[in-house]
Amino acid sequence: GAGVSQSPSNKVTEKGKDVELRCDPISGHTALYWYRQSLGQGLEFLIYFQGNSAPDKSGLPSDRFSAERTGGSVSTLTIQRTQQEDSAVYLCASSSGLAGRETQYFGPGTRLLVL
Amino acid sequence: DAKTTQPPSMDCAEGRAANLPCNHSTISGNEYVYWYRQIHSQGPQYIIHGLKNNETNEMASLIITEDRKSSTLILPHATLRDTAVYYCIVRVAGSNDYKLSFGAGTTVTVRA
């Protein structure tokens, strides 16, 4: 079946602009995660959604970052007033089951470059 | 506090088996061993996971030592498309251990 999809695949923006990144999880997966990966760096957890529960936003680096998940499926990560240090690959993953204990499957990522 | 240690790099000949080691000497009884890989410019790809028994799927085999302090990922017939960074991680099952964190991994280069 279809895997996790993300759009756009690449995004170039100017400092100060807002960007929206989209994630379509695997159908039926109740858990959705956002991570980012800077060049040569490891994964950095951003946010976790599970069903109708309040999301775990503990990884969001600043209040410029926010995310929504509508109807328990598609998620949008929004970065307001982008800064050059926001340049990274933003990865979305999804898993079935509860408490995030199941295997996470990743999308291809969105490569964000802030000029 | 690295929970796993892996060699930084290894080369493998195309068509041969690639054996990737991972040490996890402080693993707890309820921690699974997971393997992911990341091909250049792509998202991480799940490969396989196991608790204590050896596991096999269409991608790879996972051999876990009896004391669970180390494991080996085996790619039975490596191809050029297997060139990637391979990550070995441990995760607690049945808990809220959902924030994945990869170390440096092993950069595997498959050569023709």
Image (tube, rainbow, N blue to C red):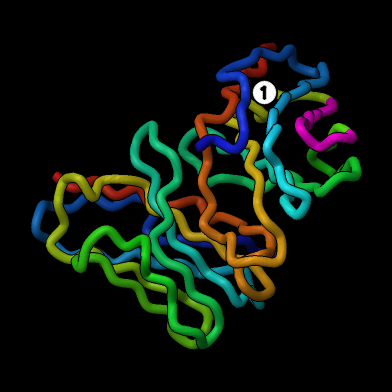
Note whether A103 is above or below B76 in the view shown: below
Q: Quadrant of the C terminus of chain B?
A: top right
Q: Which residue is mark 1?
A: B80
Q: Image point 66% across, 18% down: which residue?
A: B110
Towards the viewer: A66 or B103: B103
The magenta stretch spans residue B87: no
Q: Image point 45% across, 46% down: which residue?
A: A43
Res A47 seen here: yes
Q: Is residue A67 left or right of residue B103?
A: left
Please tell me how many numbered marks the rendered image carries. Answer: 1
Q: Image point 43% across, 72% down: which residue?
A: A56
Towards the viewer: A29 or A52: A52
For mark 1, name the chain. B
Q: Which residues are magenta?
A: B66-76
Note whether B30 is above or below B47 in the view shown: below
Give percent across and percent down for residue A11: 28, 52
Give percent across and percent down for residue A34: 44, 61
Q: Is residue B31 left or right of residue B44?
A: right
Identify the image quadrant of residue A42.
top left
Give percent across and percent down for residue A67: 34, 73
Res B63 seen here: no
Towards the viewer: B84 or B62: B62
Say what amino acid the circle numbered 1 marks: Leu
Identify the image quadrant of residue B23.
top right
